[in-house]
Image (cartoon, helix red, strand yellow):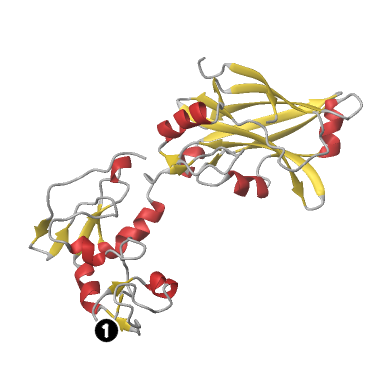
């Protein structure tokens, strides 16, 4: 369905291959060694990555790099974890810094660990970690809110994962009209409805609806998240509307990136929030069953 189409649905409660390189190359003009990344961030035929890899956590070490009297190295976090005892020779670690290894690391340039997601930049060893924490190509966490899912990946992978593994409803179109049903609306705990994903303007949006406790008050909240970066999310807006018996509540906002967890968005109340009594009023009848219709649309800002 083209953008502008409508989806109407009753909603009932309910890693990539690692790139490899043949060898390390050296930039003699700046005395900088470039090493290709592999399983733990770097791969080389000269054994440098083995020297910089912590023997306990197997990740790259950053200053302060510690060593025992026999020269075995360890990262600062693992030094505390092993209670200052060398895991290799069992001697007390003491407070010896391996300055030579820290100096070697200073001369290295490495590809971003997210190169197989699309980042092809090269960084000095001590700048690489900071970049990777904010790299726009780093994988996204699964946006599904109904369980603690540990899957991550790029957007196309997550869309397939949501459809195949979580049985999420997928709709084409930028307008929607959903009816949320719960037989016992007084149960707020674990009241999370099935996520819905919309393909709109060639991008994907996640529609959330759930109940939670706001202080002592039970409330319902609906909000939209964007499957992409925050700067892209800000190019779109959305509206939500719920009502009944001649009354309605509306919300207009900007979808949040899935970089922000669903819990973070929910707890910030960045969406359409309804007290339970009002939600039951809109449901009609004897207020013993929630039947709430939420409609809305998504549009691109000019």
Q: Closest to the observer: 44 or 129?
A: 44
Going by the picture, which residue comes out furthest to the front? 90
At x 35% / y 83%, what residue is drawn?
92
Position of 29 with respect to 226 (left or right) is: left
Specify whether residue 270 is in view: yes
Residue at mark 1: 69
Q: How many marks?
A: 1
Position of 40 with respect to 282 (left or right) is: left
At x 19% / y 70%, what residue is drawn?
104
Residue 32, percent across and down?
A: 15, 63
Residue 223, percent across and down?
A: 64, 37
Going by the picture, which residue comes out furthest to the right? 286
Is the residue marked by circle 1 packed among few (<14), some (14-19), or many (20+) residues within 10 Å? some
Q: Closest to the observer: 234 or 259?
A: 259
Residue 217, percent across and down?
A: 82, 48
Query: Please, what secondary structure does the residue beneath circle 1 have?
Result: loop
Specify whether residue 268 is in view: no
């Amino acid at each position: 369905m083209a953008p502008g189409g409508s989806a109407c649905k009753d909603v009932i409660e309910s890693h990539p291959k690692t790139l490899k390189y043949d060898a390390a190359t050296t930039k003699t003009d700046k005395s900088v060694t470039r090493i290709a990344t592999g399983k733990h961030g770097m791969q080389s035929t000269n054994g440098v990555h083995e020297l910089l890899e912590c023997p306990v956590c197997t990740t790259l070490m950053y200053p302060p790099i510690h060593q025992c009297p026999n020269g075995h190295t360890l990262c600062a976090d693992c030094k505390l974890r092993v209670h200052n005892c060398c895991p290799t020779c069992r001697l007390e670690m003491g407070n010896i810094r391996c300055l030579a290894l820290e100096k070697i690391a200073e001369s290295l340039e490495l590809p971003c660990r997210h190169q197989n997601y699309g980042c092809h930049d090269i960084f000095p060893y001590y700048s690489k970690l900071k970049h990777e924490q904010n790299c726009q190509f780093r994988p996204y966490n699964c946006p599904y809110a109904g369980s603690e899912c540990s899957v991550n990946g790029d957007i196309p992978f997550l869309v397939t994962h949501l459809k195949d593994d979580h049985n999420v409803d997928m709709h084409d179109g930028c307008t929607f009209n959903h009816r949320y049903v719960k037989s016992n609306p007084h149960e707020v705990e674990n009241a999370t409805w099935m996520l819905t994903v919309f393909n709109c303007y060639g991008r994907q949006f996640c529609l959330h609806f759930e109940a939670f406790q706001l202080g002592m008050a039970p409330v319902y909240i609906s909000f939209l998240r964007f499957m992409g970066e925050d700067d892209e999310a800000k190019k779109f807006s959305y509206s939500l509307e719920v009502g009944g018996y001649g009354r309605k509540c509306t919300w207009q906002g900007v979808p949040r990136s899935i970089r922000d967890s669903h819990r973070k968005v929910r707890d910030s109340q960045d969406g359409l929030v309804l007290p339970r009594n009002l939600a039951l009023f809109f449901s009609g009848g004897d207020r013993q069953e929630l039947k709430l219709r939420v409609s809305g649309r998504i549009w691109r800002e000019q």
